[in-house]
Image (cartoon, rainbow, N blue to C red):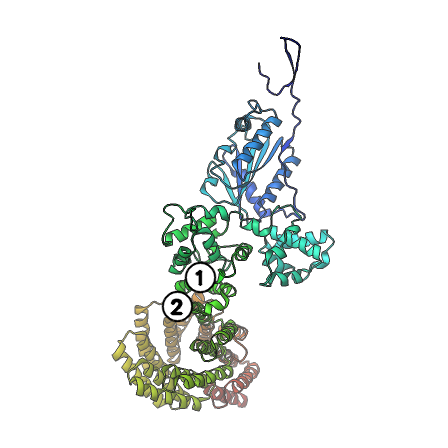
């Protein structure tokens, strides 16, 4: 007799007993088992994620529709699941189950409770696992509609038995949330859907709704967007921050100031008592919840030190190759978990493969995101990084930062043009590293990455940013190393170079005069570093049009280098070329060409005909021939060295493009205009593809093309290009940069050819004024513009 589900009462006397059973009450559908979380205040509908969930549901071929929402802590996975559960109840779904799935026992217990609640056959209430299995069997055969939510799956393997089974009626749906990214989650016909942070618009909408609904709309101000971004648009953090601002009556701008103060901590800015939505844990704990479990997985003991390394880097991402460097593996070896927890095979030095396995482990536990490739393949949420640093001893952070600095320097390409995108990412990561490494980066060789990052700014034409960067670096070097330390002086030399690149020659000269005097006082007048400092100063004098002073310095440097190093030493030959350039500027053309011819022969004899320094000497000589009217000789040289350089290096190398551009100028001068245009068009395309449209070298290439168009009589095209180049140069460089003034001068020539005389003269007057102020009245470019202005004005 089946007594399942009956209510029993025992009566009787003596040896006789009578059992009376009443039938179980009928189930009143719909039924909800488990506590479905209340939707947060100002809940955002997450339209894009819901579309992905609905699309997966619509396209799924299995009978049981299963979606797994995966993502890091605090991104709102449970809130999305709550939305679907609430919607299911509203839509009349017969059975909605919500269970905490952090371990299998909780799932089994709730399944068993559900089985008894709806009187599942075979669920006698004596064994939870038996009842739970009976419940799964019932789900597979029932005609009732149902939704099972498995919230926060932490061990997918432990739950392998407890995923609902296929149903022939197709009326069941499973929704799971997890931080894990294990392959098993996508097995069994399950669709995995990544849940990320709010979109920018969702984050703003949340703050606006949250504060407005609480009667605190006055706290919204110009800092609202910045607060959302600083919190990484993380729903959990935005919830805590909103409650904090409401409780403390703090505006978004004031809160942002507190948030970006490196002395402030998350536990103060996102306190547990601000958990108005019932998340149940502090933000830091929520973000790092899976770290202990990851630390115990193979490779054992590497999750925590690996996360500390990642926390020093740019949250927006860094390249995976970083994790193959010796600096990273050495750090992981030194900071690996020790003690009884360590398992066999997880000892000894950490290999590059193990380091990458640790990275994949962090990805699996949603502590970082690791993609297959790309310069930003490895990402970490900014708050996860901050929580990691704040839960690490302050004395341990600089050690991790120094290791990261070494690793970044190791993977930096020798020349930025080989991978501009990668170099931009490396610069961003260096910038992120500086606050964490602080002064410690200067105490060993880690400062090399600081110098490399600054050099990269110069190489990519970001001159304004480079000036600010080297100003800061020079100040740090002087504070930490002293005003006489060689590395401090190197920082100042880079700062002077940055000034010079932006046409701020007077500031460059002020810095270089000081550096040269310091070098000579400390090292003596004959030291190579002293002579290099004077040579740099001579170059700035030359650029500023102070030609006589430049000649005096370069003559002295050349004499000293030849006396100390010998006439054939590379530094001596370089000094001779600098002197030749000054002679050329000073009108001593024959002397300049004689020097360049001798240096070219010496370099070819010593280094060979295809050495880059030899080809550079030939290039200088060809340019001098062209400017002195020896065009045929210039063309012969340029054609030969361009071919040789391309053969030795590549057609896309920046120096190869410079050689081609010089050849185009010679063709243009020889009236071989069609050939010049063909070259200029190709160089312009390559410059823009490799360096981007805003690089000064790209702008110069466009300027050369405009000159060729003007020479060919294609004036409208020359003007269109010239106007754009001149405006871009002024915006990127400055209104008085030499390249900007040259661009305006060329544009004035195009206006003149187009018979727009008034515009041409007005523009040329501005060029003359700018050159007189920037350079000197005697400078060749100033004199040329003045002479041209006189001819136009009189004609």
Q: In this view, does 240 lie above or below 264?
A: above
Q: Which residue lies furthest to the top in this view?
A: 15
Taking 221 as reference, is 451 left or right? left
- Describe the element under mark 1 as helix, strand or loop: helix
- Image marks 2 and 1: residues in contact by CB distance under 8 Å: no
Q: Can residue 627 be seen in this view?
A: no
Q: Is residue 376 left or right of residue 763?
A: left
- Residue 394 vertical position relative to residue 543 in the rendered view, above or below: above
Earlier residue among tags 2 and 1: 1
Residue located farthest toward the right when viewing the structure as drawn: 215
Q: Which of 623 and 39 is in front in this view?
A: 39
Residue 623 % position (x, y):
37, 81
Q: Identify residue for label 2.
A: 415
Most extreme residue toward the front is: 14
Q: How crowded is mark 2: few (under 14 residues within 10 Å), some or many (20 or more)?
A: few
Q: Residue furthest left?
A: 605
Q: Does dot 2 land on a helix, a strand or a loop?
A: loop
511 shown above or below 687? below
Q: Distance between the residues labelled 2 and 1?
A: 20 Å
Label 1 CA crowd tier, 10 Å (few <14, some 14–19, many 20+): many
Q: In this view, does 561 lie to the left or right of 114?
A: left
Return the mark for residue 214.
none
Q: As displayed, is residue 162 above or below residue 6?
A: below
Q: Percent position (x, y) of residue 628?
A: 37, 86
How far from the left and from the top, in percent, is residue 165? 51, 31
Q: Name the residue under label 1.
A: 404
User: x, y (%) of residue 757?
Assistant: 55, 83
């Amino acid at each position: 007799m089946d007594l399942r589900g009956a209510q029993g009462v025992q009566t009787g006397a003596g040896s006789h007993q009578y059992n009376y059973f009443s039938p179980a009450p009928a189930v009143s559908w719909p039924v909800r088992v488990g506590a479905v979380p209340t939707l947060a205040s100002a809940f955002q509908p997450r339209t894009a994620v819901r579309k992905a969930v609905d699309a997966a549901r619509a396209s799924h071929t299995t009978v049981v529709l299963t979606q797994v929402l995966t993502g890091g802590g605090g991104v709102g996975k449970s809130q999305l699941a709550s939305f679907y559960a609430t919607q299911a109840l509203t839509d009349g779904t017969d059975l909605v189950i919500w269970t905490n799935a952090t371990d299998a026992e909780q799932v089994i217990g709730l399944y068993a409770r559900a089985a008894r609640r709806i009187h599942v056959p075979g669920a006698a209430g004596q064994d939870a696992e038996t009842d739970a299995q009976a419940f799964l069997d019932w789900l597979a055969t029932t005609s009732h509609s149902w939704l099972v939510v498995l919230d926060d799956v932490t061990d997918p393997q432990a739950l392998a038995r407890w995923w609902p089974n296929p149903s022939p009626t197709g009326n069941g749906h499973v929704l799971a949330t997890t931080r894990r990214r294990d392959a098993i989650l996508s097995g069994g016909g399950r669709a995995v859907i990544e849940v990320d942070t709010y979109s920018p618009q969702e984050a703003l909408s949340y703050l606006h709704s949250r504060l407005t609904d609480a009667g605190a709309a006055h706290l919204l101000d110009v800092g609202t967007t910045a607060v959302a971004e600083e919190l990484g648009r993380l729903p959990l953090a935005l919830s805590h921050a909103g409650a904090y601002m409401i409780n403390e009556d703090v505006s978004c701008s004031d809160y942002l100031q507190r948030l970006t103060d490196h002395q402030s901590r998350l536990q103060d800015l996102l306190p547990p008592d601000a958990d108005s939505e019932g998340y149940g844990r502090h933000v830091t704990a929520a973000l790092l919840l899976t770290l202990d479990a990851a630390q115990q997985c193979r490779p054992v003991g590497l999750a925590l030190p690996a996360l500390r390394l990642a926390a020093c880097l740019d949250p927006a991402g860094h390249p995976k190759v970083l994790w193959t460097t010796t600096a990273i593996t050495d750090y992981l070896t030194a900071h690996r978990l020790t003690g009884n927890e360590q398992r066999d095979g997880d000892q000894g030095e950490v290999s590059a493969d193990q380091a990458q396995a640790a990275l994949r482990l962090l990805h699996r536990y949603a502590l970082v995101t690791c993609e297959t490739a790309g310069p930003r393949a490895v990402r970490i949420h900014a708050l996860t990084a901050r929580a990691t640093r704040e839960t690490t001893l302050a004395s341990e952070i600089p050690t991790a930062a120094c290791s990261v600095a070494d690793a970044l320097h190791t993977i930096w390409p020798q020349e930025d043009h080989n991978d501009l995108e990668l170099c931009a990412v490396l610069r961003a990561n260096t910038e992120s590293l500086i606050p964490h490494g602080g002064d410690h980066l200067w105490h060993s060789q880690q400062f090399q990455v600081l110098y490399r990052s600054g050099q990269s700014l110069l190489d990519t034409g970001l001159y304004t940013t480079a000036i600010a960067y080297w100003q800061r670096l020079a100040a740090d070097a002087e504070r930490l190393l002293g005003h006489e330390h060689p590395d401090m002086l190197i920082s100042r030399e880079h700062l002077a170079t940055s000034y010079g690149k932006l046409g701020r020659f007077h500031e460059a000269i002020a810095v270089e005069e000081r550096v040269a005097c310091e070098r000579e006082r400390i090292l003596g007048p004959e030291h190579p570093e002293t002579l290099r400092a004077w040579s740099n100063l001579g170059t700035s004098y030359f650029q500023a049009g102070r030609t006589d002073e430049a000649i005096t310095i370069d003559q002295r440097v050349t004499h000293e280098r030849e006396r100390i190093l010998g006439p054939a030493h590379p530094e001596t030959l370089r000094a001779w070329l600098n002197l030749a350039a000054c002679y050329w500027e000073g009108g001593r053309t024959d002397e300049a060409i004689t020097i360049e011819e001798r240096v070219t022969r010496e370099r070819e004899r010593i280094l060979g005909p295809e050495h880059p320094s030899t080809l550079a000497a030939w290039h200088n000589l060809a340019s001098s021939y062209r400017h002195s009217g020896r065009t045929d000789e210039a063309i012969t040289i340029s054609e030969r060295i361009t071919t040789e350089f391309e053969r030795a290096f590549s057609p896309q190398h920046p120096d190869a493009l410079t050689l081609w551009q010089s050849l185009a100028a010679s063709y243009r001068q020889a009236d071989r205009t069609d050939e010049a245009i063909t070259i200029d068009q190709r160089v312009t395309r390559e410059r823009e593809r490799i360096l981007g449209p805003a690089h000064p070298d790209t702008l110069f290439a466009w300027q050369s093309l405009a000159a060729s168009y003007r020479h060919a009589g294609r004036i409208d095209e020359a003007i269109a290009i010239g106007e754009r180049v001149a405006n871009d140069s002024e915006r990127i460089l400055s209104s008085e940069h030499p390249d900007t003034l040259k661009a305006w001068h060329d544009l004035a020539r195009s206006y003149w050819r187009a018979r727009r005389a008034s515009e041409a003269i007005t523009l040329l007057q501005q060029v003359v004024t700018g050159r007189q102020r920037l350079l000197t009245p005697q400078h060749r470019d100033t004199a040329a513009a003045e002479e041209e202005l006189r001819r136009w004005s009189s004609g």
